[in-house]
Every structure is written in structure tokens, then in C-alpha cells.
Amino acid sequence: MSRTLLLGGARSGKSALAERLARECGKQVVYLATAHAGDGEMAARIEHHRARRPAEWQTVEEATALADRLRELCAPGRIVLVDCLTLWLTNLMFAEGQVYPELGPVTLPALFAQERAALLDWLDNAEGEVIFVSNEVGMGIVPFGAVSRCFADEAGRLNQEVAARCERVLFVAAGLPLVLKGPPC
């Protein structure tokens, strides 16, 4: 069993590194995509990622039930690449069509807490190899607006929890990995 977390900013090279690590491990690769194309810009981003992936990789899309899907997909001789945890958080935050206030407290849907807890529980008992990709969103200014601050806080908390459960954690900037925990790539 091996669990890896790759953190970085937008266009840092974290997904490309995750894909390289998966390709080089010599196992069957399952790409677990959490994004869905809600608009043309996101559709273009998804297509960019698809075009880079080898044709023999299996792609599975899952917007919310990540732990359930990992239980199904993780198996001997296979590595699962999850791209990405922050899009998954966004999906959970808006899964029930919430409209959040610009100011004041943000109440997240019950699904958010349930799925987050399920993922962390799966990680505590994980079987198989998995690479997680996640954005580090807390290195800039404090976001404007309650929902943006809530998202940044929740992403940071999730990254900490996942990192604590992974054997290897890398931070990627300008395409270069910095080892935070575990063996180098």
C-alpha cells in the first residue's frame, strides 16, 4: 500500500507529476477525475488533461462519492490517481445547489461532512496504491467573501488530514517537486 499527496498551486505541474509517477510505477492506472464541465472554460481544462493521458488508462469520473469509488477501484496491480481533491470539495459544497451568503457564516451541506469523513476513514484503512492531487490555496491573501474563505479553510484542513495519512507528500512549484514527507519521486 502506498499513498501519495501532491500539493501545488494552479498550473504548478502537480497533475503532470502525478501522471508521470503513475506511468512509471508499472501498474495498471485508473484516473479518477472529480471535475465536471460546468462551462466552456472547465471543459477546455478537462480536455487538456484528457489529451495528456495514455489511451490505455481507464478514466472514471466521480464528483462526490470518492471513498466509495476508491473502495471499488483500489486493487493489487493497480494505482489510482485522484485529480483533484479541491474540485471534489467544491462539488460537495455545491452538491445540493446551495447559494451562500457573501458575508456571515457558511453552513455546509450534510453531504460535505459525510463524504469528507468517509474519505478520511478510507485512508485510515486504505488498501492499494493511490496518488492524490490537491491545490494549495492558502498561500496568498485571505479570499474576499464568506464562501471563498470557507473553501480555503476547508481545503487547508483536508490537505492536512490527507497529508497526515499519506506516506509521501510532495509540494510542486514551477514543475519542480519538493519532498515534504517520505521518499523522493
Image (cartoon, rainbow, N blue to C red):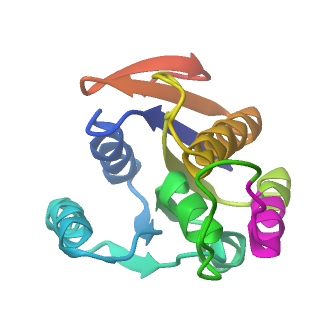
Q: Position of residue 126 (x, y in %)?
A: 76, 58
Is 116 one of the magenta-colored residues? Answer: yes
Q: Is residue 144 above or below residue 184?
A: below
> Is most of the magenta stretch helix, strand or loop?
helix
> How many numbered marks are there?
0
User: Residue at the location (85% across, 59% down)?
Assistant: 121
Image quadrant where residue 33 sits: bottom left
Quadrant housing the C terminus = top left
Tell whether 113 sits left or right of 7.
right
Left or right for 47, reference 9: left
**185 shown above or below 135:** above
Q: Which residue is drawn at 50% across and 45% down?
A: 134
Does residue 58 lie above or below 15 as drawn? Answer: below
| Residue reaching furthest to the front | 103
Query: Is-magenta flag for residue 172?
Result: no
The foreground one among 57 and 174 is 174
At 51% across and 65% down in the image, what residue appears? 78
Q: State the extent of the magenta-drawn residues as a range.
A: 106-119
Residue 74 appears in which quarter of the rendering? bottom right
Q: Is residue 10 visible?
A: yes
Against 13, residue 18 (above or below) is below
Residue 91 percent coordinates (x, y): 55, 70
Q: Where does residue 130 sit, x and y in percent of width and height? A: 57, 54
Q: Which of 5 and 40 is in front in this view?
A: 40
Q: Position of residue 184 (x, y in %)?
A: 47, 22
The reply to whether residue 75 is in sight is no
Residue at point 39% right, 51% down?
22
Left or right: 38, with 44 as reference point: right
User: Which image quadrant is residue 58 in?
Assistant: bottom left
Q: Nearer the viewer, residue 123 or 33?
A: 33
